[in-house]
Image (tube, rainbow, N blue to C red):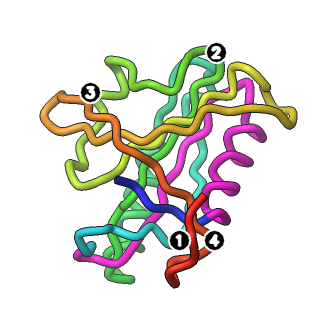
Amino acid sequence: MLTITEELYEQIVAHARKDHPDEACGVVAGPAPAPADGRPQRFIPMLNAARSPTFYEFDSQDLLRLYREMDDRDEEPVVIYHSHTATEAYPSRTDVSYANEPGAHYVLVSTAESGNAEGPVSFRSFRIVDGVITEEDVTVVPSYDGAPAR
């Protein structure tokens, strides 16, 4: 299960809307080694180097800098997210082939219904290990201090 704060949820959705019609992508880092509940904490929007409505790609230099920075801060990628602009929030074959962090939550946001305007989005999380996709529940909380979830 992915537990994420309202603030992080809203930041991911806002990034997906802002970059629409291109796919948005980014990472939410957390302390390393992550505890069993792996709490995402630091929102890191990335540039989709492909600048495509059907495909995302992290810029290799940006990704290298990000991993060095996370290493320096004793962090790891807890959430790796991207958006789908015209299809459902479910990993494509390409998404699965890029999933190389077995401990990460892979979040997909579909902006197919609302585009970059206010309106409904689909926000789903998956574990992808050895090519196997497993959807998981998402709980959005005001904060990680024990406040009730929505």
Residue 62, horizontal then vertical, whole percent: 48, 54
Q: Mark 3 vs mark 4: give the one in front.
A: 4
Residue extending furthest toward the left:
130
Can you say whether 1 is above or below 41 in the image? above
Residue picked out by circle 1: 42
Mark-to-mark CA distance, 2 and 1:
28 Å
Q: Name the residue under label 3.
A: 97
Q: What residue type is labelled 3?
A: Ser
Circle 4 — which element? Answer: loop
Give the label, 2 or 3, closer to the camera. Answer: 2
Q: Name the residue under label 4.
A: 142
Q: Which residue is drawn at 56% across and 64% down?
A: 149
Lower position in the chain sequence, tag 3 or tag 4: 3
User: How packed is label 4: few (under 14 Cα within 10 Å), some, or many (20 or more)?
Assistant: some
Residue 88 % position (x, y): 54, 19
Q: Badge 3 local density, few (<14 within 10 Å), some, or many (20+)?
A: few
Front-lying residue, 68 or 101:
101
Cα distance, mark 3 to mark 4? Answer: 33 Å
Q: Name the residue under label 2.
A: 86
Mark 2–mark 1 CB contact (< 8 Å): no
| Residue stretch rendered in magenta on the structure | 6-33
Q: What residue type is labelled 1?
A: Arg
Helix, strand or loop at label 2? It is: loop
Q: How crowded is mark 2: few (under 14 residues within 10 Å), some or many (20 or more)?
A: some
Q: What SS does tag 3 mark?
A: helix
